[in-house]
Image: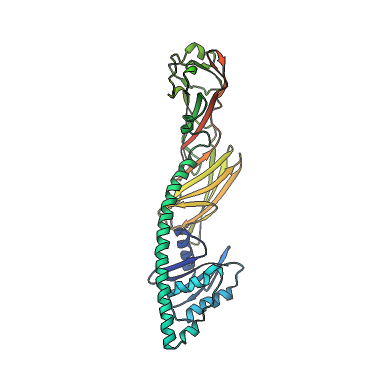
Amino acid sequence: MIYSLFSVDIENNKKIFRSTKPQSISKINYIFSEFISSLQHVIYKDLYNYVSIGLSNTMFIVAQISKDHSISEVNDYLEKIRTSGVDDLFDILISFDNILYNGYAINDDIQMIKSMDSQDEKIHELMLEHRKQERKELEKEYKRQRNQDKLIEKILTKEKFKNTFDSFNEPVSKILTSDKPVIISLKETVDCTISSENFIKENSVKGELNLTITDEYYQNIKIMYCNIIENAKFSPFLDKELLKEKILKVNKNVQTNKKVPLVKYTTKHSQLPISIDCWSSNEDGQKVDSLTFTASKDIKNLYIQFNTKKLTRLEIDGRYDEINDEIRLNCGTIKKDDSIMYEIKHSERDPSGIFPLSLSFETDMVSNLKITKVFSKDDQIDDFDFIKDFTINSYIIEE
């Protein structure tokens, strides 16, 4: 299979690129850099090969092909382009489109075209001119569509990022729309900063327990609990005598549709949910960062994000999304004590590396607080929700 066709003029830095599937700008730049760094007729890589022919000392046409694709066949196609005498990038682009059309190679009889009589040549020139105009219109339409797609992607991505970085526990917005008349919500917010050597710079977990009622019947609600975090602070508006019995009750009648704070606490992870093992090396002018992320508890929807604005020749082994100047690694689920590894390459001349990394994930609450029973006017009720919201405010890995 032919993955891509491109032409590059090293002297004038002119480039054109065609591919059988959409490619990111960083990937296209990497393909150009990978070829230019070798400049050989055939370049063998682990997952694909490059086959090239020179149109001049500085201008080359190149095919990126699968490992099982015939090198001689591709060489014939490139040779046809070379012997046709084309030196205009637009004509080369048309030839590329013909070769990649529907994944099949179309053999233009270029020699026959060159031997046409004057009338045929004029007709052919008109056809080519028409094709150029069509191509220009298609390029304009493609550009408009790309801009529209980028705008849509940006909007969707923002919403997706927002949803992704929220906890898989019930978010606060859902508390207000719960259909239960009594809502007890426990929220934990995590701020953590560590180095690539796992030195802890910040390890903070802030928690708060709140009560919301939507019916006046439940204004005198009493909540029995257990396993509250040591050194937790209780609201001064709670009944102090009932607190001795591990019962939460507000002294005054609770207003409806108002969030009433009951308990708050500050603690830390006894063991970081995710640690990192980072090894760096140099290879063919690139810096290679081998990153291993290990989970101390079950982790869901792990995303790792870093900025690529100052990175070149970027190559990533693994699933990722690219949005503007940000790369987001989609790591998925990691079971307790399991690991996931990524290898990231970029030019060793880049002024900065991949750090800092920003992590988002879902995991269990630090607190093991439980609500055992809920009473209203001394009657035990089941018509309540106990909703947990675990939020990563920041989880940063610095160099």
Position above or below: 121 against 309:
below
Which color scheme is applied?
rainbow
- The residue located at (52%, 74%) in the rendering is 41
Position above or below: 103 against 56:
above
| Location of residue 255 (image quadrant) | top left
Quadrant location, the N terminus: bottom right
Q: Is residue 87 visible?
A: no
Q: Position of residue 281 (x, y in %)?
A: 51, 55
Q: Residue furthest bottom?
A: 117
Position above or below: 302 against 382:
below
Q: Position of residue 342 (x, y in %)?
A: 54, 50
Q: Residue furthest top?
A: 241
Q: Position of residue 353 (x, y in %)?
A: 44, 51
| Location of residue 301 (image quadrant) | top right
Q: Position of residue 4 (x, y in %)?
A: 51, 67
Q: Is residue 98 visible?
A: yes
| Location of residue 69 (image quadrant) | bottom right
- The residue located at (53%, 22%) in the rendering is 228
- The residue located at (53%, 34%) in the rendering is 169
Left or right, 191 with reference to 66: left
Position above or below: 85 against 240:
below
Left or right, 9 with reference to 78: left
Total numbered labels: 0
> Which of 66/283 is in front?
66
> Which of 122/305 is in front?
122
Q: Residue furthest left?
A: 12
